[in-house]
Image (cartoon, helix red, strand yellow):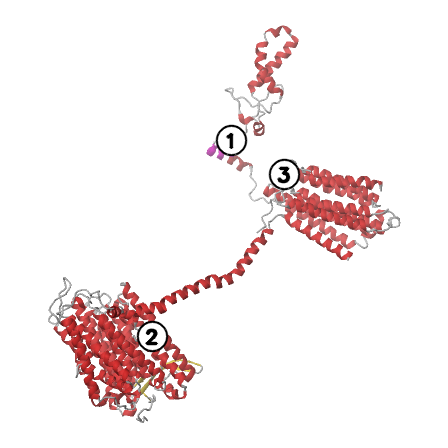
Amino acid sequence: MIAFWILAPVMVIAALGLLFVRKAVHAALLLAVVMMSLAVLYAALEAPFLFAVQIIVYTGAILMLFLFVLMLVGVDASDSIVETIRGQRVLAAVFGLGLGLVMVLGLSQISLGTAVGLEDANAAGNIQALANILFSRYVFAFEVTSALLITAAVGAMVLAHRERLTPKPTQRSLAAQRMKDYAELGTHPGPLPPPGVYARHNAVDTPALLPDGTAAESSVSRVLAARGTVRSAPARAEDIHEIEGTLSGATHAGRDAVAPATTTEVTPATGEDSE
Amino acid sequence: MYALNEGAIPVVNAASADGVYSLLWLVVALPLAGATILLVGGRYTDKWGHLLGTLLPIGSFLVSLVLFFDLLGRDEGDRQVSQHVFTWFQTGHLDVGMDLLYDPLSALFLLLITGVGSLIHVYSIGYMAHDLRRRRFFGYLNLFVAAMLMLVLSENYLGLFLGWEGVGLASYLLIGFWQHKPSAAAAGKKAFVINRVGDMGISTSIMMFFALFGSTSFTVISEKAANASETQLTILGLLLLLGACAKSAQFPLQAWLLDAMEGPTPVSALIHAATMVTAGVYLIVRSNFIFEAAPHAQTAVVVVALISILWGAAIGCAKDDIKKGLAGSTMSQIGYMMLGAGLGAAGYAFAIFHLLTHGFFKANMFLGAGSVMHGMNDDVDMRHYGALRKMMPVTFLTFAMGYLAIIGFPGFSGFWSKDKIIETALADNWLVGICAIIGAGITGFYMTRMMLMTFFGDDRRWEKDVHPHESPSVMTVPLVVLAALSVLGGVMLAGDWIQDFLAPVVGTGAHEDPPLPALAVTVIVVLVVASGVAVAWLLFGRREVPRTAPQDVSFVTRAAREELYGNQINDGLVVNPGRHLVGGLLTIDKHVVDGTFTGGPVSLGTLAGFARRAQNGFVRTYALSLLGGVLIVVLALLAVNLA
Amino acid sequence: MDVTAYVVLSGILFTIGCVGVLIRRNAIVVFMCVELMLNASNLALVAFARQHGNLDGQIAAFFVMVVAAAEVVVGLAIIMTIFRTRRSASVDDASLLKY
């Protein structure tokens, strides 16, 4: 019973957390806590087979499936706290409390007497005893279960399957489309220019320079442009110049006399860089 | 076959038609065919339509004439012939045939309708010569003649009703013939609506005939009528009287007749003087087997007749419109016929006699009025006439014949017929007789007024640009014929011929001696009429007639100009309460009835509208109600266990 | 050893799962709460198996796990499909079936 008294509060708190956390991933982790604790309680209740199954099947398979779907849907998707249905929360709380109170009070009023215990039933081992029952008395239900699982698998496939409504585009049709766009909309038919590459690092966030010295905007990802983290090549050049200056200053101290004018000029660029 | 017992109610017992009588159906069929051809043929018949439309009634007239002379040649008790044309319908115990009955009564009507009708057709050729829709007019006239013939020839009430409705329809079409005038359209509608009131009486009585006697045939009913109770017969009589009042423009359903003058003048002559309005009289005379056994109904007829005589005469005195003046006189004269018909077996023959003579002289005068209007650019106001006797001599002379006939100038047809009715009325009840004599006096007054204002005097009060002229001969020839008939119509009374001729149909009344000798009555009547003429001459002959009607007149004159407030009474008693009733019923229907019926579903719908809000589509709301249900079940289990 | 405590714990976890289903809007989290309810019932089954000295309860819990596995597979596939078409994993957004 020590395990129970330790685990029960943990489980209740984790379950309550399920109600209040905003992110679905956290909810899944809290549910994992509840399930693992349940597995332990199964062990305490002389059900070693279910202990294993709970961990392997429930926590291992089902909960992972949940997480997998969460990843597909989007981890960021957090619930808004505002309740849209009027009175839903209050009524749910009232009804839930009512049901909980009735069950807890009702169940604590009854006395089940001393538990029989499973020593006799598990005499030949829990798994053997379960197998005996499962493949004799419950064999029909067991076989039906297989049908259920197959149906579920097929159903999941059917639901997840996306029907292709248009023929798969071939390379030829893609090329034709590209030329057509060029003819009609003026879209550039070739690949986009790569970002500027400098000897010192792969600057994905720095646009390439066109022959006239201006930046080619299409050479950097739009995401970076939206974030506002695109650098400009001239700034980078100053940057390099300054670093070079620092480096040479360390080795040739005599150069410092010349350097200050430029150093003060590039200070903003340095500050920008450090951000 | 027929026993001529005094006072006995004759029974219709017709021999089946053979020989020349098998042509009977032609009388109706000819004008009906004319109407069909002219109305269906449309403008393809425009060129010759009026000629065909005139020839066919003349054909009918010739057939009627042949039949009439053949009838005269037959034995007196053998003068009823019926022809079974076809079975109209037969359901269960009801068996209604399209049977025609030819007996002395219908024989006279046939001659009147086809004879006068044909003359009016001839007259219309000239009168309507410049109307673009003349062919249609003749189609309607033929339809009218066919319906009227059907009315008087049918052997059962249902066939009579068919003709009755046909006459109503034709009348509606003809009164509103110039439908581009709103007043004409309204007048047609008014006549139609008022006639529906009467139709209600007739159709109800037909239903009663079916219920009481199982048939509408005159043969069956006249035989079985004695078995019915007097109350039943009184009700039947009153219902028939209601119908007769509407069709004959008798009080209280007289209002339509004056407005009906909106129609072309030949229509006024044909329908509203000579034929259609006499249908009511025909109905009562034909139903003599009902009225003879229902004295109260007869009394009602007499009362209605007296009121109509005086009412119509009063209107005739005040109207400046020549046609409306004549219309008032028509109402009054038909009152005389109704009076005769209401007096029972003693009066039927005289009612028919007056009907015939009136048909002659009134048609004559209406056509004369039409001729005057023709010469006066369709002006109808007598105050714009004057001194026309020299301008249109034929019209003047023929009109004068009609005038002398209607006022009862000794020797003229109207003198004989009206005198007989007054005599019979005096013998029946002296009060009734005196009223009739007063009516005769007023007739003398207003007819003289009309004559004086139209033809006499020397001041020509004509409108500018009016050049009175005589009408073409196609119009004057019918006038001459009718004038001759107006003068000579009285010969029918010679040797009590008409009474004996009609006796097989209407019986002969017990002869009652009038309180005064017949000659004295005649002298009194002539004196009263003469005084009426004298008063009119004093008022209009010696003084100049103002061109506009004087306004500072007594209450009586104003009332008479307003047709004794007949329209206002109708409006006040029937039309406005009816409107309010219908309006009230409509409101009740809209708000109470509809409210009750639609209220339930509407409130249910509103409720459902609120309930469906529960189906908000949110899974979590459904889950919440699920949890609520679980909670309730758990609590219930707990409660059960604790209890 | 008394199993009443286990059963009470099971009830508490079940109720928390219920409320979670009602108030969370992310379909995946709602689904997790359903799993929590299933696990809570499993705990009760195992506890009662021990109480009665009978392994049938453990067999039942085993079957529950199998069914839960099948349910999760299908349920997550449905959530995926909905997300793919509506770009949202909120259970409130799929509310077209209404008045």
What amino acid is found at the position of numbered circle 1 in the picture? Pro
Contact (Cβ within 8 Å) of mark 3 with mark 2:
no
Q: Which residue is mark 1?
A: A189
Binning the other alpha carbons within 10 Å of mark 3 as few (below 14), some (14 to 19) or many (20 upward) gives: few
Residue drawn 28% across and 90% down? Answer: B512
Query: Is B623 in front, or is A54?
Result: B623
Q: Answer left or right for C17 relative to B587.
A: right
How far is mark 1 from mark 3, CA to CA?
A: 44 Å
Residue drawn 34% across and 89% down? Answer: B11
Q: In this rendering, is residue B132 above or below C54?
A: below
Quadrant placement of the C terminus of chain B: bottom right
Residue A267: image x %, image y %?
A: 59, 15
Q: Is residue B52 visible?
A: no
Query: Is B87 in front, or is B145?
Result: B145
Q: Which residue is mark 3?
A: A80
Asked where in the image residue B102 lies, by quadrant, the reply is bottom left
Asked where in the image residue B407 lies, by quadrant, the reply is bottom left
Does dot 3 land on a helix, a strand or a loop?
loop
What amino acid is found at the position of numbered circle 2 in the picture? Glu
How far is mark 3 from mark 2, CA to CA?
A: 85 Å
**Picture disc at residue B165:** 2
Binning the other alpha carbons within 10 Å of mark 2 as few (below 14), some (14 to 19) or many (20 upward) gives: some
The chain under label 3 reads A
Q: In this rendering, is residue B5 above or below B380?
A: below
